[in-house]
């Protein structure tokens, strides 16, 4: 794998990550969970900054653009939801949706961490130590986000995704993530 290939994979994955967080934000907002929706909107903006930063890094250090390639729609939102309104979502669907949404988030972050760690090793194998160090910052961030997502998922599982408890935290989360 070349340095160009590595950065193309990073760029492609980051763009897909932007799509994942946008869709998760819409997903949770559709379920009436504006705190979770705002959380993913926050991650979208953060990861947008990271994408710009890695694009600029590659341009400044390799004098090239990151190679664009097609990014498939991650399909976070179930297609059968498209025919419903938010008012038609019942409690059972909401509960299952919360669990599935958090599973998708955890899976995405775990996949991202695995990919970035593999690409980090590839950069080291090419003796591109400075670029590996740059990528290590993203690895740390993803590892932290994965940990938070896993912890929140575990908390929700411990309360069996109790909608009353989930709803009580939405306003606090919305305010927390709306500061930016």
Image (tube, grey):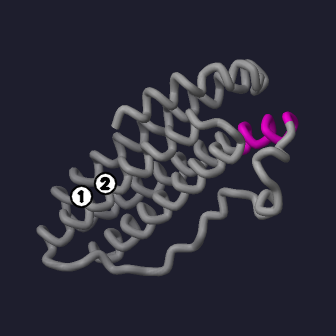
The local crowd at label 1, few if under 14, some if 14 to 19, many if 20 or more residues have their Cα within 10 Å, is few
Disc assigned to residue 97: none
In the rendered image, the vertical position of residue 54 relative to residue 39, given as above or below = below
The range drawn in magenta is 91-100
Q: Are marks 2 and 1 in contact (CB under 8 Å)?
A: yes
Closer to the camera in the image, 13 or 20: 20
Q: Secondary structure at mark 2?
A: helix
Image position, residue 162 (x, y; %): 77, 22
Residue 96 on the magenta segment: yes
| Magenta highlight: main SS | helix
Q: Quadrant for the N terminus, please.
A: bottom left
Marks 2 and 1, how far apart at CA: 5 Å
Q: Secondary structure at mark 1?
A: helix
Q: Residue at x 65, y 22 (%)?
A: 155
Q: Circle 1 sits on which residue?
A: 53
Image position, residue 86 (x, y; %): 76, 47
Image position, residue 148 (x, y; %): 50, 31
């Amino acid at each position: 794998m070349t340095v160009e290939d590595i950065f193309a994979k990073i760029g492609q994955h980051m763009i897909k990550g932007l799509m994942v967080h946008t869709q998760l934000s819409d997903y949770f907002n559709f379920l009436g969970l504006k705190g979770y929706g705002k959380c993913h909107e926050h991650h979208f903006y953060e990861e947008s900054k990271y994408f710009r930063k890695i694009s600029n890094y590659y341009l400044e250090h390799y004098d090239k653009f990151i190679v664009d390639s097609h990014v498939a729609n991650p399909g976070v939102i179930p297609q059968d939801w498209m025919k419903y309104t938010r008012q038609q979502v019942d409690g059972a669907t909401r509960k299952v949706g919360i669990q599935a949404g958090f599973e998708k988030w955890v899976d995405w972050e775990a996949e991202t961490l695995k990919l970035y760690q593999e690409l980090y090793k590839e950069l080291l194998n090419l003796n591109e130590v400075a670029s590996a160090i740059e990528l290590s910052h993203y690895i740390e961030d993803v590892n932290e986000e994965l940990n938070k997502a896993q912890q929140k998922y575990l908390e929700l599982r411990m309360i069996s995704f109790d909608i009353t408890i989930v709803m009580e935290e939405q306003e606090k989360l919305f305010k927390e993530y709306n500061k930016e």
